[in-house]
Image: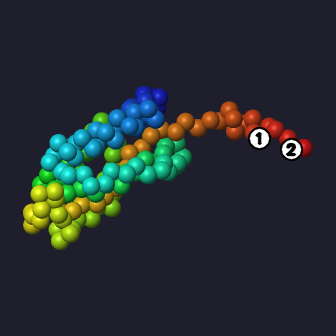
């Protein structure tokens, strides 16, 4: 039963080769929701115990409801993606079509995670070696 739960949890954490397609999906979701992407900048991985955080800084322009639809669609992705540190500003928002009072300038961090395999065999070998 524990093994089945572990396998189920792993389906939520993409492996290394799935990360680029997941990031592309997030970017495409933003465009599909009518949002203008100003910044999409992947940051270095942050290694935790058995997983790594993969943060992406994003800045987008769009209407409030379009942002809500985007966040809702991200929440329904088959992988774990958290949206953190959201800030929205109406005053500084300017789209390609000019100034629009209904447009918001939003900044946030989209964080996904990947499984990191713990290599116990190499740890045991390191402990077994003697220093000379």
- In this picture, is 35 found above or below 9? below
Residue 80 falls left or right of residue 75: right
Determine which residue is flagged by label 1: 127
Is there a contact, CB below 8 Å, between mark 2 and mark 1?
Answer: no
Q: Is residue 72 among the parts visible in the rendering?
A: no
| Residue 129 relative to residue 101: left or right | right
Which of these two is toward me, 84 or 124?
84
Does residue 117 appear left or right of residue 86 in this picture?
A: right
Quadrant in which residue 7 is drawn:
top left
Foreground: 19 or 38? 38
Query: Quadrant of residue 93 in the image?
Result: bottom left
Label 1 packing within 10 angstroms: few (<14), some (14-19), many (20+): few
The quadrant of the picture occupied by the C terminus is top right
Q: In the picture, residue 24 is in which quadrant?
A: top left
On-image quarter of the N terminus = top left
The residues tagged by marks 2 and 1 sit, at their Cα atoms, a distance apart of 10 Å
35 shown above or below 19: below
At x 52%, y 39%, the residue is 116
Q: Secondary structure at mark 2?
A: loop
In this rendering, is residue 85 above or below 112? below
Residue 131's disc is: 2
Q: Position of residue 83 (x, y in %)?
A: 31, 53
Numbered mark located on residue 58 in the image: none
The residue located at (77%, 41%) in the rendering is 127
Q: Position of residue 112 (x, y in %)?
A: 38, 45
Kind of element beneath mark 1: helix
How many marks on residues?
2
From the viewer's perspective, is 44 left or right of 23?
right
Q: Say whether residue 125 is visible.
A: yes
Residue 27 pos. (x, y %)? 27, 44
């Amino acid at each position: 039963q524990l093994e089945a739960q572990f396998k189920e949890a792993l389906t939520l954490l993409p492996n290394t080769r799935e990360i680029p397609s997941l990031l592309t999906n997030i970017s495409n979701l933003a465009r599909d929701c009518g949002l203008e992407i100003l910044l999409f900048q992947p940051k270095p991985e942050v290694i935790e115990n058995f997983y790594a955080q993969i943060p992406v800084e994003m800045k987008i322009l769009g209407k409030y409801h379009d942002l809500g639809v985007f966040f809702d669609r991200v929440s329904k992705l088959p992988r774990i993606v958290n949206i953190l540190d959201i800030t929205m500003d109406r005053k500084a928002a300017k789209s390609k079509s000019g100034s629009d009072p209904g447009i918001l300038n939003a900044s946030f961090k989209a964080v996904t995670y990947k499984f990191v395999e713990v290599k116990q065999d190499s740890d045991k070998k390191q402990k077994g070696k003697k220093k000379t």
